Image: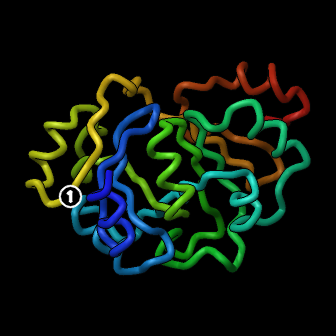
């Protein structure tokens, strides 16, 4: 873990497990660290990134026009496999959301990863794979893909391999942009006043 902490502190990238798949994490507010992740993944620069944060307060810090039910939604499902898309405020740098008006938020539930986010965050953490290939669920395969260029924390057993649900709350109605581990019915069960 010391190697991972040193790498993140120095603006490098690290492979860390979440409850879904591995992510390639780096400091979100460091443009060079973000650029490194784009280069490692060979990811198109116009594809926006999410912010991985540790607390609900961090979501408020980087967003605006939050719905009244946001606290209850987060209490029900976070930390966990839910990505929440909100309007970005001026605290979100352009190298994160590629100039879009929105930004996605994740609070992953892997305890070691969440501790690192709390210490060094916000962090970006797109899936740890080369752009266009399947999301990373095998630590050894990921290390082969990146040619041992990045340190990582191996914990294949924690991963479900099922992507997070992406819930867009930036418009007048909620929209599920990607169906993942949490269903619309799950959300309505916990937050019945959400409007789809």
Q: How many numbered callouts? A: 1
Picture coordinates of residue 47, whole percent (x, y): 42, 63
Name the secondary structure under disc 1.
loop
> Against 3, is 69 above or below?
above
Picture coordinates of residue 71, whole percent (x, y): 83, 44
Please tell me in which quadrant of the rendered image residue 58 appears.
bottom right
Picture coordinates of residue 140, whole percent (x, y): 14, 37
> Against 61, is 57 above or below?
above
Left or right of 156 on screen, residue 85:
right
Please tell me in which quadrant of the rendered image residue 60 appears.
bottom right
Q: Which colour scheme is used?
A: rainbow
Give the residue displayed 13% in from the left and 48% down from the top.
145
Picture coordinates of residue 70, whole percent (x, y): 82, 45
Q: The C terminus is located in which quarter?
A: top right
Give the residue displayed 66% in from the left and 77% down from the top.
91
Give the residue displayed 72% in from the left and 73% down from the top.
89
Residue toward you, 103 or 117: 117
Left or right of 81 on screen, residue 187:
right
Left or right of 104 on screen, residue 12:
left
> Against 186, is 133 above or below?
below
Residue lying farthest to the front in this orientation: 2
> Against 80, is 124 above or below?
below
Give the residue displayed 80% in from the left and 44% down from the top.
173
Estimate how packed mark 1 is, as few (under 14), some (14 to 19) or many (20 or more) residues with alpha carbons within 10 Å. some
Q: Mark 1 points at which residue?
A: 150
């Amino acid at each position: 873990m010391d190697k991972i902490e040193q790498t993140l502190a120095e603006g490098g990238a690290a492979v860390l497990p979440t409850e879904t798949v591995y992510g390639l994490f780096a400091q979100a507010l460091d443009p060079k660290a973000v650029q490194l992740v784009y280069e490692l993944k060979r990811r198109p620069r116009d594809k926006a990134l999410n912010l991985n944060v540790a607390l609900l307060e961090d979501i408020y810090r980087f967003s605006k026009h939050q719905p009244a039910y946001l606290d209850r939604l987060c209490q029900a499902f976070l930390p966990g496999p839910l990505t929440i898309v909100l309007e970005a405020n001026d605290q979100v740098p352009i190298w994160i959301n590629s100039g879009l008006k929105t930004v996605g938020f994740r609070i992953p539930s892997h305890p070691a990863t969440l501790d690192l986010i709390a210490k060094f965050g916000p962090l970006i953490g797109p899936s740890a794979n080369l752009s266009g290939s399947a999301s990373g669920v095998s630590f050894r395969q990921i290390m082969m893909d990146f040619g041992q260029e990045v340190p990582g924390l191996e914990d294949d057993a924690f991963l479900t391999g099922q992507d997070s649900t992406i819930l867009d709350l930036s418009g007048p109605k909620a929209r599920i942009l990607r169906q993942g581990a949490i269903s619309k019915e799950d959300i309505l069960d916990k937050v019945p006043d959400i409007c789809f």
